[in-house]
Image (tube, rainbow, N blue to C red):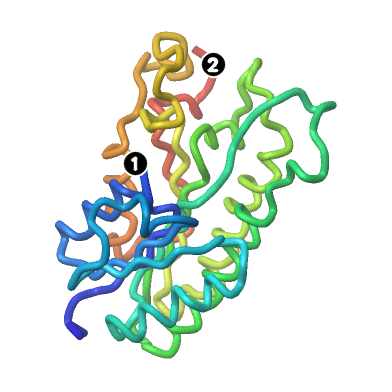
Amino acid sequence: MDTQKKTIVITGAAQGIGEGLVNTFLERNYNVVATSRQISARFAHGASESVAIVDGDIGDPATAKRITETAIERFGSINALVNNAGIYFSKPFLEYTLDDLLSSTNLEGFLHLTQLAVKQMLAQKSGGSIVSIVSIGASTADHPIAGVNASVPMITKGGIHAISKSLAMEYARDGIRFNVVAPGIVDTPMHHGGPMDFLKTFSPMNAISSVQDIVDAVLFLTEARHITGEVVHVDGGAHVGKW
């Protein structure tokens, strides 16, 4: 057990942004606990000296318990958490049902794991960082875009914005920081084969973010020891206004 290295927990780590996060934090010499529903079958690294993998539904409190226990047993600490797992889709408001609230993954998953991570950070008395990625397209939580009908998913995404700011104040004196990354359109597997030229028009820069663009924002917030309560938009300026 290497207790000198920092340990970070990353959810939704099997592909896309999550896999990019794992790779970058390993390069930064962190221990990584990576989790998703079927990560052992899909994650290229597999378990190693610096990587522990945990399969499970993040909306299940038993999964959060296994994740935190794994981090402590394998690496002795939890210094950072990235809440990356999330579900996002759009359709007309009148077609949504209560099942579309997505509360299990987007809200309950945040609650179960973040509570346990904060509890461990308080016990360690060395502060910590929690960054939540409010899913692809979440910049529309602040500035809705005509034609992007994502009203109900924004209940959960807007909620993560709000709770992160509240928690930033609640735990500021304990040195535990809470920040949010709000991506626009990102070049991940969910968009492969899609109308990329059209998707570029969702940004005034006429560009799609790469996975590494999002990862770099998360890394910055994780290591920026005096930043808390912030929402960093990585959307090519889409949140700024009309273009």
Kindly identify which numbered label has been placed on residue 3. none
The image position of residue 199, as x and y in percent, is 45, 16
Pointer 2 local density, CA inside 10 Å: few below 14, some 14–19, many at least 20:
few
Choose the circle earlier in sequence order: 2 or 1: 1
Please say if 165 is above or below 125.
above
Indicate the amino acid at tag 1: Ile
Please say if 186 is above or below 30.
above
Report the quarter where the N terminus lies. Answer: bottom left
Q: Residue at x 27, y 45 (%)?
A: 216
Pointer 1 local density, CA inside 10 Å: few below 14, some 14–19, many at least 20:
many
How many numbered marks does the figure carry? Answer: 2
Q: Residue at x 41, y 67 (%)?
A: 54
The image position of residue 207, as x and y in percent, is 34, 18
Q: Is residue 95 left or right of residue 109?
A: right
Identify the residue at the far top of this view.
197
Residue identified by numbered label 2: 242
Query: Alpha carbon of mark 2 to alpha carbon of mark 1: how far?
Result: 23 Å
Q: Residue at x 45, y 17 (%)?
A: 194
Indicate the amino acid at tag 2: Lys
Q: Residue at x 17, y 83 (%)?
A: 2
Identify the residue at the far front of this view.
41
Kindly identify which numbered label has been placed on residue 214. 1
Which mark is nearer the camera, 2 or 1? 1
Q: Quadrant of residue 98?
A: top right
Please tell me whether mark 2 sits on a helix, a strand or a loop: loop
